[in-house]
Amino acid sequence: MTSMRKHRTAVSGIMLIACLSHALCACAESAPAAPGNYTAQDQRAARMLNALGDRAYRAGQFNEALKAYMASYPNFPNPYAYLMSGDAYWRAVLASHQGRSGDEAGRCRVANEHFPSDLRRSLEEHFQRGLALHPAPGRASEPNAELRRRAGTTAACLGELARQYDGQPATTCVALDRLSACLGAPLLR
């Protein structure tokens, strides 16, 4: 009974983050799509929310960073907010499981049950949208060129991780060190 409760607790953290991400993305999808529909005030609000997200991200408060970046979408969809939200989402997942003695105690911290679909949804809602909004690669001097490069690398790694876990049983434990390796060092310091 206790191990079942612990499993539900571990899964509930990732599910809470996934539900928050899904709900905020649903709001973002209702935002106008044409760039001409945004005012200078909309752009300022998005920049303010991105700055708020950056402060939370630098403080290691990845759930708060995720909320701020995603709140930026409806104000003014921008590649920075989408790419940073994708990174913050998975760092929040990792942070929610840090310090837990899962695997070494014979307990799985994150089971594979929803992991591949969460990865694919994150790739679609955050990384693919952010990369699509970002100017085409090629100019090293473009703003956020390094962010685009790192996000592309992270997205490729997360996509491969989703493919690797796709055929695995739902009870398979996710190797969080592999997820961490896909993210690499934090994007902001």
Image (tube, rainbow, N blue to C red):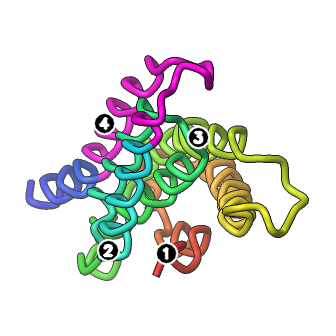
Q: Main secondary structure of the magenta part?
A: helix
Q: Position of residue 83 (x, y in %)?
A: 57, 52
Position of the N terminus by quadrant = bottom left
The magenta segment: 14-43
What amino acid type is highlighted by mark number 2? Gly
From the image, tell me which residue sits under label 1: 188
Displayed quadrant of residue 183: bottom right
Badge 3, how many Cα within 10 Å: few under 14, some, many 20+? some
From the image, tell me which residue sits under label 3: 120
**Is 85 one of the magenta-colored residues?**
no
Q: Position of residue 141 (x, y in %)?
A: 80, 68
Give the distance between the C-alpha atoms of the residues marked 1 and 4, in whole angstroms.
25 Å
From the image, tell me which residue sits under label 4: 19
Instruction: Single out the residue that lies furthest toward the front.
Output: 40
Q: Nearer the viewer, residue 93 or 48?
A: 48
Does residue 182 sit above or below 148 in this rendering? below
Q: Residue at x 47, y 22 (%)?
A: 29
Q: Position of residue 126 (x, y in %)?
A: 55, 43
Q: From this viewpoint, is residue 93 visible?
A: no
**Which callout, 3 or 2, points at the residue further toward the start of the chain?**
2
What amino acid type is highlighted by mark number 3? Arg
**Is 28 one of the magenta-colored residues?**
yes
Q: Residue at x 90, y 59 (%)?
A: 138
Give the distance between the C-alpha atoms of the residues marked 2 and 4, in whole angstroms.
20 Å
Q: From this viewpoint, is residue 17 visible?
A: yes
Q: Nearer the viewer, mark 1 or mark 4?
A: 1
Residue 70's mark? none
Q: Residue at x 58, y 76 (%)?
A: 184
